[in-house]
Image: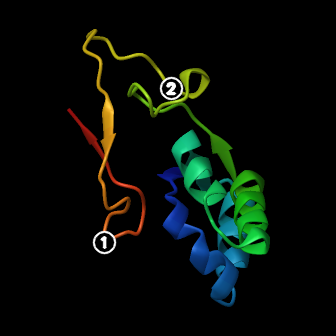
Amino acid sequence: MRRVLLDSNALDPLLTKFGAFEALDQAVSSASLEVLYTHITVDEIAATPNLETRQWLLNLLVFLGRPILTSGAVADFSRANFCRVMADLRILTCKRQVSGSNPLTGSPSVSAK
């Protein structure tokens, strides 16, 4: 079985490309593929401005995949019940850029300091 961790951008083609959902659904149903996602993916989809698109994307994610914990925690960004605390005790804090988004992805930019 192959496991994939989906980013929110990977879900958009499932709504727009003919046969994309069916192909992924078949792979998941036949147990040749396991789709995983984190709370970060859910948060990104929840920020989708169009209500109908947001509902479809969240439904696709939950229907096809299963949630997993992130492998680390970042103060002021990670959800405590959806992450693992890092082995070293350094605390990372997030600083959002003033521009508010990454020009390559359109997603909010986060950097550790």
Q: How is the image coloured?
A: rainbow
Of the pair 109 and 35, the residue shown nearer to us: 109
What residue did someone put label 2 on? 83
- Residue found at the very far bottom of the displayed protein: 18
Q: Element under label 2?
A: loop
- Decide: is 110 above or below 90: below
Q: Dot 2, how many residues are within 10 Å of its Cα: few (below 14), some (14-19), or many (20+)?
A: some
Residue 11 falls in which quadrant of the image? bottom right
Work out whether 25 lies above or below 62: below
x, y (%) of residue 71?
41, 29
- In the displayed structure, 58 sits above or below 78; it is below
Rate crowding at label 1 as few (under 14), some (14 to 19) or many (20 or more) other CA atoms within 10 Å.
Answer: few
Q: Earlier in the sequence, mark 1 or mark 2?
A: 2
Residue 77 as seen in the image, left or right of residue 97:
right
Residue for badge 1: 104
Q: Which mark is residue 86?
A: none
Residue 112 shows in this picture: yes
- Residue at (68, 90) in percent of width and height: 18
For discs 1 and 2, the disc positioned in front in the rendered view: 1
Residue 40 versus residue 16: which sits nearer the camera? Answer: 40
Residue 49 spot, x, y in % from top left: 65, 69
Type of the residue with mark 2: Cys
Q: Are marks 1 and 2 in contact (CB under 8 Å)?
A: no
Q: Which of the 4 image quarters holds residue 69? A: top right
- Does residue 96 appear left or right of residue 63 in this picture? left
